[in-house]
Amino acid sequence: MANKEEVLRLENLAYEMRKKLINLCGVYEGSVHIGGDLSMTDLLIGLFHHGLNVDPNNIQNPNRDRFILSKGHGAVCMYIAMAMRGFFDYDEIVRTYGKLDSAYGMHPCKVQLPGVECSSGSLGQGLSMAVGMAISAKVKKEGHRVVCMLGDGETCEGSVWEAAMTGRSYELGNLVAVVDRNCQMMCSYTEEITVMDPYADKWKAFGWNVIEIDGHDMNAIVDALDSLPPASSARPTAIIAHTIKGKGVSFMEKVVGWHAGSLNEEDFKQALVELAANYGREE
Amino acid sequence: MAGSFNFGEWISARSVIGDTLCEIGEKNEKLFVCTPDVGMNLKGFRQKFPERYIDVGIAEQNCVGVAAGLALAGNIPVIMGMLPFLSMRACEQVRTAVCYQNLPVRIIGTGGGLTSGGGSTHNAMEDLAIVKSMVNMTALSICDPNMIRDILNLSMDYPGPMYIRLAQGKKDRQLYEPGTVEFSIGGSVTARDGKDITIIAHGEMVGEALDVAEELKNENIDVRVIDMYTIKPFDKEAVKKAVDETGKIIVWEDHLMSGGLASSIADYFVDEQIRPAAFKRFGIPQVYAGFGSGEELRQKYGYAKEHVIKAIREMA
């Protein structure tokens, strides 16, 4: 079982991160992919602040775990999770996000932003790159893991399943796919458009070790990350995290229109009030 | 190359690739060879370096993505496959996973032009137009089977992505005696000097152009042949020199007439206000060619030797 204090620490960080996301969404003039950011907030806190072996002071450390954000439209969520870990400066993100010459764009670019492992944004491509990185680590007998975060919607892309087959065929126990199963795409609910259930069974059928969790339960996230099979094992692992798009803000939760958007003054205040009610703790 | 050299002899570029990858694999641990189930000539590498041989099955998009991941981890992946599928099925992975991240992935394939014999599904006739348009991409088209050895060796130290086009690669005409010509990425070869007109060609059309030049020698027409094996960036100096010295230019390629090397050279003439005395191009018109050998299809679609010879006589 996960250490209680550690879970509490991570939960507090996730609350802070939600506030930072809402703040950015309120400040930025354009649209932010806030729905899918809030669905994977707890997962990214669990990864960058607990599960991943990464060091903001040594971003080229060859032994570091590699993280690939295949759902690249969640870039700002990753920037903020990494900023809170010391990789980037949150204020700079807020000040420059999406602006000319900023390294912090809507989709992550490794060329412009060292610390990011991989440029992404075109959906369905991340897992193949993760497979390539995991093969390299295995051949070179490096002990680290490669973790790839996917949205469930992008698993409509056939290339994801091509990569899933290769991950199993090359026995990549060092490869972990985390699927943000929020059951929504940009314009619809997944099951209304493309039936994905039984979802975990699909990954099992591709030969993956599958862990299903509530992606907003920090205990479960920590347990899943702590109990991964050894990187030297033969099967890649898929963590299917059941989540809610827009989690934490009632008028965003499971609302199709909040795939991306910006907040007016009233909604901004309301969102912060709700976050405090849902996540705030009495001192 | 083993044995004595016979100019004009035919050997398989694919087998040269297989041998060369084995040689490079011995000294360079960064080399990985990836393929979407097109590994007939990679058996040697597979046996010697099984861990660095990655066959993902018939999945070009995944193959290019995996190669990008290998490159992100500091390796130099060489992908061997069929060009229409690497350049089109996996087009976006090549553009976004490889070129956008500026990764040293080498994409080598067969099926350039109308040589595949497989019909339009298997003909890469628009591939250069596609890959040329990708930022950071270097593109080559190889005629001589031995040239591929030098190019592969050079590619190990060359930054960024690279696309290398072959015809069928089963039976290729040797044009240069090994060791006598120095190749470079970005370079060209003046395969035959001449003063009246220049044919700029790449791939299989270089050998054809040399035949044309030989035939026209009897009519006192002195044809220069430039083997423009680097398509992007092409050798502008050689083109400018040809305009200055021969005036008339023909570009001949087994690719759509629009979008290939001829288009690049036409762009160059426009941008630099270069006015050749004559400029004509031969290649594939806007058609999905049917079945037949490369030579038969070139005749059918108006870019065979006889068409080029006729045009040169008219231009001379």
Image (cartoon, coloured by chain):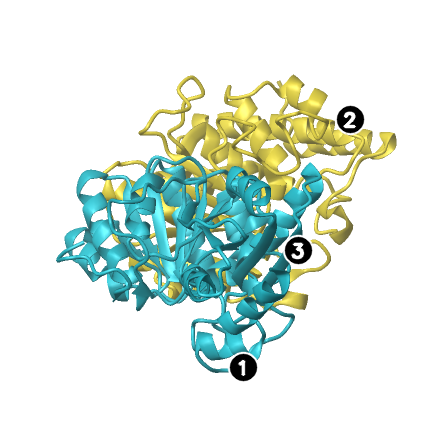
The residue that label 2 is drawn on is: A27
* Residues marked 2 and 3 touching at CB (< 8 Å): no
**Could you say which chain is coloured yellow in the image?**
A
Q: Quadrant of residue B154?
A: top left
Q: Is residue B31 above or below residue B283?
A: above
Q: Residue at (41%, 38%) from the top-left corner?
A: B72
Q: Nearer the viewer, residue B206 or A129?
A: B206
The residue that label 1 is drawn on is: B290
Looking at the rendered structure, the secondary structure element under dot 1 is: loop
Quadrant where the image shows the C terminus of chain A: top right
Report the amino acid beneath label 3: Met
Q: Chain of mark 2?
A: A
Across and down, in percent, residue B174 comes to 30, 59
The residue that label 3 is drawn on is: A185
Question: What's the CA distance linking mark 2 and mark 3?
Answer: 25 Å
Q: Is residue A235 visible?
A: yes
